[in-house]
Image (cartoon, helix red, strand yellow):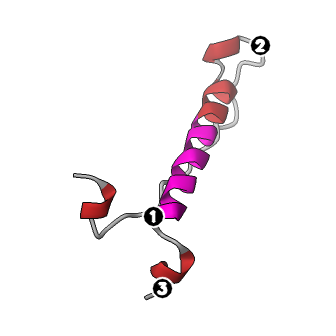
Amino acid sequence: MNHDDDPFDPAPEAPEPPHDGECCESGCGDLCVWERYNAERAEHERAMAAWRLRNPPEARFK
């Protein structure tokens, strides 16, 4: 099923930032919780852009 077949198309949920103390501050690179969070945020922005195209403001409030 694609999004056009589903009348319920909620906006993607944003990722939660790392909690205090999750980052070890050692500069671990790809495994850093902040690196993963930033990648998840970028994916969320792409998903939101696609969602906005499928759900323009004028269609959301009908």
Seen at 70% across and 24% down, the residue is 23
Give how far across and how far down residue 14 sits, in percent.
56, 51
Residue 44 on the magenta span = yes
Q: Crowding at label 3, few (<14), some or many (≥20) Cα neighbours within 10 Å?
A: few
Q: CA distance from mark 2 to mark 1?
A: 39 Å
Seen at 70% across and 13% down, the residue is 29
Depth check, mark 3 against mark 2: the one in front is 3
Q: Secondary structure at mark 2?
A: loop
> Of the numbered discs in the image, which one, if any, rests on residue 29?
none
Give how far across and how far down residue 55 sits, in percent.
47, 69
Q: Which residues are magenta?
A: 40-54
Residue 5, quarter of the rendered image: bottom left
Q: Secondary structure at mark 3?
A: loop
Q: CA distance from mark 3 to mark 1?
A: 13 Å
Q: Crowding at label 2, few (<14), some or many (≥20) Cα neighbours within 10 Å?
A: few
Label 2 with label 1: CB-CB less than 8 Å? no
Q: CA distance from mark 3 to mark 2?
A: 46 Å
Residue picked out by circle 3? 61
Q: Crowding at label 1, few (<14), some or many (≥20) Cα neighbours within 10 Å?
A: some
Residue picked out by circle 1? 54
Depth check, mark 3 against mark 1: the one in front is 1
Q: Earlier in the sequence, mark 3 or mark 2?
A: 2
Amino acid type of the residue that numbered disc 3 sits on in the rendered structure:
Phe
Magenta: main secondary structure: helix
In depth, the one of 25 and 48 nearer the eye is 48
Residue 35, quarter of the rendered image: top right
